[in-house]
Image (cartoon, helix red, strand yellow):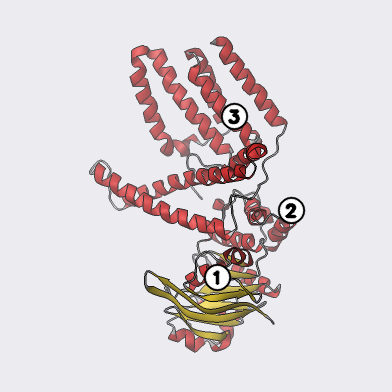
Amino acid sequence: MDTILEVKNLSLNIQKKQILDSVSFSLKRGSFTAICGKNGAGKSQLLRILKGLRKQSDGAIFINKEDVSKNRSKRLTQVGLVFQESDLQIVGETVEKDLRFGPENLGWSEDRINNKVDEMLNLFSLTSLKDRRPSTLSGGEKRRLAIASVLAMEPDILFLDEPFSALDYPSVISLIDTLIMLHEKGVTLAVVTHEVERFLAHTTNTLILKNGRLIYDGASESALAELKKAEVYVPNLPFKDLSWKM
Amino acid sequence: MEDVVIFSTRMRDSFLCKLNPLIKLLFLIVFSASISIASNEVIFILSLSIFLLAIFDKLPFKELYKGTIFFFILSILIFITELSFGYIHAIAQAIKFLAIVVASLVFTDTTSPNETARSIAAFLYPILKDKANSFGFIIELTLSMIPKILETSIKILDARKCRGERMLKHPIRMLTGFSVSLFIHLFDQISSYADGLESRLYTNTVKRKAKAYSYRDLITIIILLLVVGISIWIK
């Protein structure tokens, strides 16, 4: 597998506070990565920088071997980000219109947009909800719509910020199924979370952040001891059982 | 389930929702202008028509009561100030004001901000070219913020009430605290909303697809011309 994303010495300072400190890592195409760390470790800020919503203080970002450190618009197109509060990302008046929103901004032809919208409605089982107002959907359905809307823009990498927060058990299972399905389809996924017991068993590799520094970058199976060091709750279970989906 | 907030849209399969936003906007402007210059008799007829239209549109008056109480108070004030010109005139003026409010509510209830902005941008595009898209972008953002402001206000008021605050006890302290909370929340929300839009590559330069015109719009224009014609004739 070739490298799709490479981050070199990425740092972020906000009001003299070091939020990220020389973070370097790379993601392989088609990988499924967990980005872990306790609250305030810098996970969400890292995603915002990678997406192009925030400027880094220092460091370089390469996507498909191209330096996009100063090219925010390229990062906005190539990196997909599902916010923790997915409500903020949903802007269409109906599910279908929300799915169209991103592709329209990319200036795609009407046929291409229609095909992509149909594909996403089917892939995320949203067809029966296509005329519903997003504000009337359940938390799980909103999360699915947010992921579908971002994926509709065909990003190279998909980041999800705390996708399991505020979801009930069936919605978490449904979301895990969605992530597994996307991984099997070859989508490069990275999920930020501090709730590793919900899905870590399905990931291929793990990044652990502690106080803005990357303290682990390797296989998920070998990450358990480091996760505990980073004060992330990990139940005493074998790696293969670290999933709510049995 | 979400609450129904004034000036928010409930998209559904109805005649009014299917109308082109520009036609509805034109109707609203012409209706407001006509009723403003009309005689008392015409004010009653036009007001009755718009109230019937609101019932036909199934405008949720019960749910909207909380948000529209301010307009009712204003209409009472208008009635009191116009009393010196006679009862009929005062009633007509108060009803005229309420009719314009109801017409605006019907418009926003059946027309999404996006559709309105896109239709205006498409209408202006032949003259303004790319500037029309920027203009539409500004309208879209502004209109979409109105329900957010109202929703946030209601949430803050409820939260303050839950923590024992009573407006009549310390009105100035309450209003100051409420305003500060509202601004802080709105700035947060606007910032997050802007991030959400930017992350999905929303820019002011993209030309968007506007709603097409249909036979319904033609029917509405005919009705509109009749309203204007009758108003002028009676005048």
Towards the viewer: A203 or B136: B136
Residue shown at the point (55%, 51%) measured from the top left? A136
SS type, badge 2: loop
Residue type for callout 3: Leu
Residue A17, how many percent across, how many down?
38, 73
Distance from the alpha carbon under mark 1 to that under mark 3 = 45 Å
Quarter of the rendering containing residue B75: top left
Closer to viewer: mark 1 or mark 3: 1
Q: For the residues tagged 1 and 3, is the chain the same?
A: no
Protein chain holding label 2:
A
Q: Which residue does the numbered mark 1 point to in the structure image?
A: A50
Q: Which residue does the numbered mark 2 point to in the structure image?
A: A109
Q: Residue furthest right?
A: A111
For disc 3, the neighbor class at 10 Å (few under 14, some 14 to 19, many from 20) is: few
Distance from the alpha carbon under mark 2 to that under mark 1 = 28 Å
Above or below: residue B55 compared with residue A235: above
> Which numbered marker is on residue A157?
none
Q: For the residues tagged 2 and 1, is the chain the same?
A: yes
> Which numbered marker is on residue B26?
3
Q: Earlier in the sequence, mark 2 or mark 1?
A: 1
Protein chain holding label 3:
B
Residue type for callout 1: Leu
For disc 1, the neighbor class at 10 Å (few under 14, some 14 to 19, many from 20) is: many
Residue type for callout 2: Ser
